[in-house]
Image: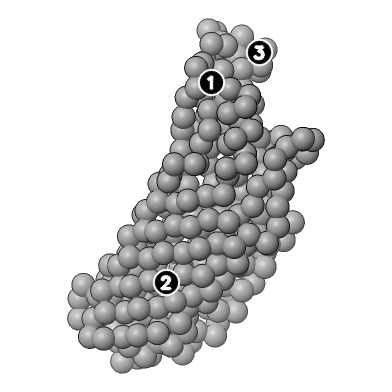
Amino acid sequence: MKNRFIFCLCIAAFISFTAYGQDSSQQHKNLFNFGLGGNFGVAKLSVNNLNHSLKQQNLPAALDKWPFYYEADMFFEPITPETKFTSHLALGFAMQENDEGNIHVNANAINYGYYIDYLALRHKRQFFFTGIGFGTLTYKYSFIDKSNYPSSYPEALQNFAGERTIRSGALFYLNVEANYSYALDKTDNFLLGICAAYNAGLNSKTMQLSNGYNLSESPKVKANGFNAAVSFIIQ
């Protein structure tokens, strides 16, 4: 299912690149006929049920205290005064570590998304655009028992009892976002701004082992969440 979704994203990207890339305005001399961007901020994720179950087992919780969020974006048309619509692909990543006694957890959330953007307002060097989109997200928690570390290479190959990884299946979401950016140069090649986005989960999943084996009595998780970040775009 996840591979099919990524394939659909690639098809959408190709259509967007074909539709937008050939019609870019010649009035602006951009560095590329597309844009590359990134976000750095924090996220609030819907993992309360999962973390509550971990605490009941005396395990450390994670991804519950506004973890740092990183995102890489590719826009299929530069954002210029003549732009009305564009679209972009996004790859987002949030991670957090925590300890409880001898147990260490390294958790992350990874999302892939496709978004359609509308330039709602342009004033001088200021841009305000909004967007809607869809995507998929997965959670992954890796636990390590620090009291059970192997002391030698042969022991490490024979004893796997000290580690366990659980993850969710593919969680799908709809997304709404808003971005305010300011052009740092007269040709709008470098944009710096702030952005915020909200994900509304479309399905829920129980946790499973890293090999895909479903775990009974597992709490369900969804892709609901919010993030706010500083953004930049080079185009």
User: Is 171 in front, or is 233?
Assistant: 171
| Mark 1 lies on residue | 103
| Mark 2 lies on residue | 178
Q: How is the image coloured?
A: one colour
Q: Residue at x 53, y 20 (%)?
A: 103
Q: Quadrant of the C terminus?
A: bottom left
Graded by Cα atoms within 10 Å as few (under 14), some (14 to 19) or many (20 or more), the crowding at tag 1 reads some
Question: Callout 1, which amino acid?
Answer: Ile
Sequence order check: which comes first, mark 3 or mark 1?
1
In this rendering, position of residue 68 left or right of residue 171: left
Sequence order check: which comes first, mark 1 or mark 2?
1
- Quote the CA–CA distance across marks 3 and 1: 17 Å
In this rendering, position of residue 134 left or right of residue 100: right
Q: Residue at x 46, y 69 (%)?
A: 177
Question: Callout 2, which amino acid?
Answer: Ala
Q: Residue at x 58, y 28 (%)?
A: 55
Residue 220: % across, % down: 70, 45
Q: Residue at x 60, y 35 (%)?
A: 52
Q: How many marks?
A: 3
| Mark 3 lies on residue | 159
Question: Callout 3, which amino acid?
Answer: Asn
- Quote the CA–CA distance across marks 1 and 2: 39 Å
Secondary structure of the residue carrying numbered label 2: strand
Secondary structure of the residue carrying numbered label 3: loop
User: Is residue 114 shown to the viewer in this render?
Assistant: no
Secondary structure of the residue carrying numbered label 1: strand
